Amino acid sequence: MCWKYFGDLYFKKRHILQKYKFCKLCLDEKTNLKSFGKSTSTTNYMNHLRAVHNLDVKSLNNLKSSTMTQNALKSSTSCNNKQQNARRVAEMCCWDLQPFKIVERPGFKKLVSFLNPKAIFPTDRTIATTALNDVYNIYLDHVKTSLKESPKNVTLVLDMWSDKHKHLSYINIKVHFCQNFQMQIVTLKTEIFPRPHTGLAVVEKIEEALCEFNLLEKNICAVTDGGSNIVSALKIKNIPRYGS
């Protein structure tokens, strides 16, 4: 999503400063033109958009991702009201990064009582041990069905980052495609990525995602930053790559 805000610089139809990418918003707003090396990570691109242009690309991505899954829980009707409420709360906590303990808080209980005095909610423990798994499985089935009906041509978007506090690294794999003239964005994986972070290790993660979501027969290209391990992995897989 952030790539559309950055690009090459041309002067009188001549490509100049080819080693860099430039922020289109800085150019449009006639502010100090910010340049980025071609190996710059997507995280740094997004940080620039957020800090300088007050544009949260991550939130826009989440909003687009919800297009495919917003009706997932509606399709599951074989449960009572208490189970349905538990699933809804689990979903809300996932979206808003809230603790399941919220169902025990006086303010939440007061609000629910006002909206529906007869509503029954399970404990936070039940939500964590039962409802969360239900929500995950419902969304997973919905996503697999949507991907099965997706066009032949899809795009992978890969990113990696590190949590310096916990000393953990993560990998994220998304797939983008256009369906009924609407851009669809689906997260296939976001998980801990242990060392070594080699190209072959990235290949393994790509293959796991493509296999799990039945994408092996699709025509795939990829959009990534210039991370050497990701570039190497895509070369090994013979997947066309676009990006810095």
Image (spheres, rainbow, N blue to C red):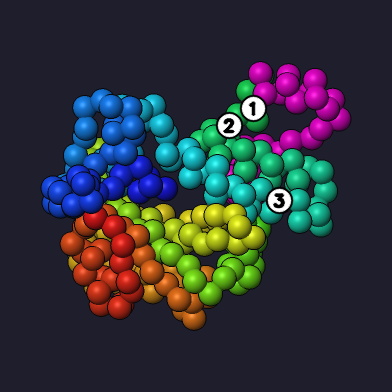
Position in image of residue 232 (x %, y %): 21, 69
In the image, what residue occupies the spot 45% across and 76% down? 219
In this picture, is 137 found above or below 60?
below
Q: Magenta region: which residues?
A: 107-135
Position in image of residue 152 (x %, y %): 53, 74
Mark 1 vs mark 3, foreground winner is: 3
Please tell me how crowded label 2 is: few (under 14), some (14-19), or many (20+) other residues with Cα within 10 Å: few
Amino acid type, mark 3: Asn
- Work out which residue is located at the far right of the displayed protein and give it: 118
Q: Quadrant of residue 146?
A: bottom right
Question: Which residue was labeled with disc 2?
Answer: 101
Q: Are marks 1 and 2 in contact (CB under 8 Å)?
A: yes
Please tell me how crowded label 3 is: few (under 14), some (14-19), or many (20+) other residues with Cα within 10 Å: few
In the image, what residue occupies the spot 29% across and 53% down? 160
Question: Which residue was labeled with disc 3?
Answer: 71
Of mark 3 and mark 2, the one earlier in the sequence is 3
Observer-nearest of 29 and 232: 29
> Which structural element holds mark 2?
helix
Residue 183 showing in the rendered view: yes
In the image, what residue occupies the spot 24% across and 55% down? 244
Of mark 1 and mark 3, the one earlier in the sequence is 3
In this picture, is 89 found above or below 1?
above
